[in-house]
Image (tube, rainbow, N blue to C red):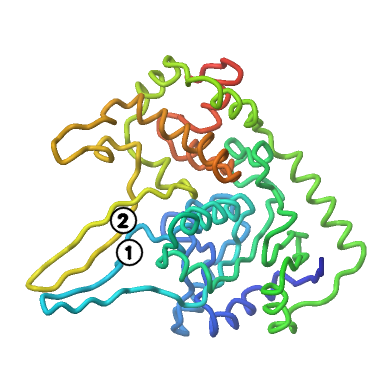
Amino acid sequence: MTKKVINKSDISKLLIDANNEYNVYVPMEHIGGDVLFSALSKEKNSLEEDVKRINLASEKTFNSPKEIFYPQLETMMEYNDKGEIKETVESSKKLVFGVRPCDFHAIAHQDNFFSKNYEDKYYLSRRENSLIVIIGCNTPPRPEACFCTSVGTGPFLTEGFDIQLVDLDDYYLVEIGNEKGADFIKKHEKYFSDPYRDEIKHAERKKLEAEEKINLKVNFNKALQIMKTEEIPQDNLERIAERCIECGACVYVCPTCTCFDVFDDVKCGEGVRCRIWDTCVFSGYTREASGHNPGAKKEFRAARRYEHKLKYDTLETGISGCIGCGRCLHSCPVDIGMSNFIKEITTNQKYH
């Protein structure tokens, strides 16, 4: 694997240059302190302000990069009463900079979902023209909630990436994973130099130290085996249902959720067809036109969510529907999270 180094002071210059060719998405700090993946402006003055708000070192990137390829709300087509139909397929080149290893696994999950049975051109057109730069996690972004080592998604990647960065204080070690990544580095080679042997060794030490910092451990394989052979205990589901307030926070921050609804908005002979995120934990998800709802009970919906994430996805594709990012636990106001559920069914440890 080819390796380079880049000084942290050159990152903003690199991104400004890349912004001429790509739509660049990067973690940026917003009003209130939230750090969200956002696009750099193409307008010079606004771009300068955006660059000042870049926060690659943040341990609180709230959203995943999922919305870049699969927007929460998107227009699929426009039409009118003259019979004219115009599809709106977005295919601009994208550079997504600062993706965490677990979130890259989530993107692989989305890639599989949107291409395995039917090729979703709205998703795939965005994804095909993208370059993703990973930043490995020297420390867990959510120390009390991250459990990537339990599901094999971090804190660093070993293969499959375009480019991966290892934070070495004043600079990054740059690992080039494929030809796409190599082409990008070559095009911007003035910012990169060859690493010394000590720098490579330093990076390997950082990776080992990072694994030791992941304190939250769950037995994912045992949970999968239990769910393959037996039903989820009813008392577990009832306890979850009693606590859950159906706010949807867990699914809106989850980087692997794929459920959506489609609706039309028609006015004065013109209309648009849109796709919007939906979730199987809401009671309306399974409500039929007759009014009957086979998924009305919260216990049923809880079982479906956990079985989907932990069992069905893994058995069908080999890719877990849970990447261990901890966002569900971090965002849940009543402290229900995937890690707590796994602990319950594998150790009989009840969370309160």
**Mark 2 secondary-structure assignment:** strand
| Res. 344 visible in picture | no
Residue 269 versus residue 119 in the image, above or below: below
Q: On screen, 152 above or below 123?
A: above
Q: Which element carries disc 1, helix, strand or loop? A: strand
For the question of whether residue 43 can be seen, the reply is: yes
Q: Residue at horizontal 60%, vertical 76%?
A: 15
55 or 146: which is nearer to us?
Answer: 146
Q: Are marks 1 and 2 in contact (CB under 8 Å)?
A: yes
**Amino acid type, label 2:** Ile
Q: Residue furthest right?
A: 197
Q: Earlier in the sequence, mark 1 or mark 2?
A: 1
Residue 223 on image: x %, y %: 59, 27
Query: Relative to 53, is 132 on the left or the right?
Result: right
Rendering coords of residue 12 (x, y %): 62, 75
The image quadrant of residue 74 is: bottom left
- CA neighbours of label 1 inside 10 A, class few (<14), some (14 to 19), many (20+): some
Q: Residue at x 67, y 62 (%)?
A: 161
Q: Position of residue 20 (x, y in %)?
A: 54, 85
Pick the quarter of the image with the N terminus.
Answer: bottom right
Q: Which residue is mark 1?
A: 74
Q: In the image, which disc is placed on residue 276?
A: 2
Residue 320, position as x, y percentages in the image: 57, 42
Is disc 2 surrounded by few (<14), some (14 to 19) or many (20+) residues within 10 Å? some
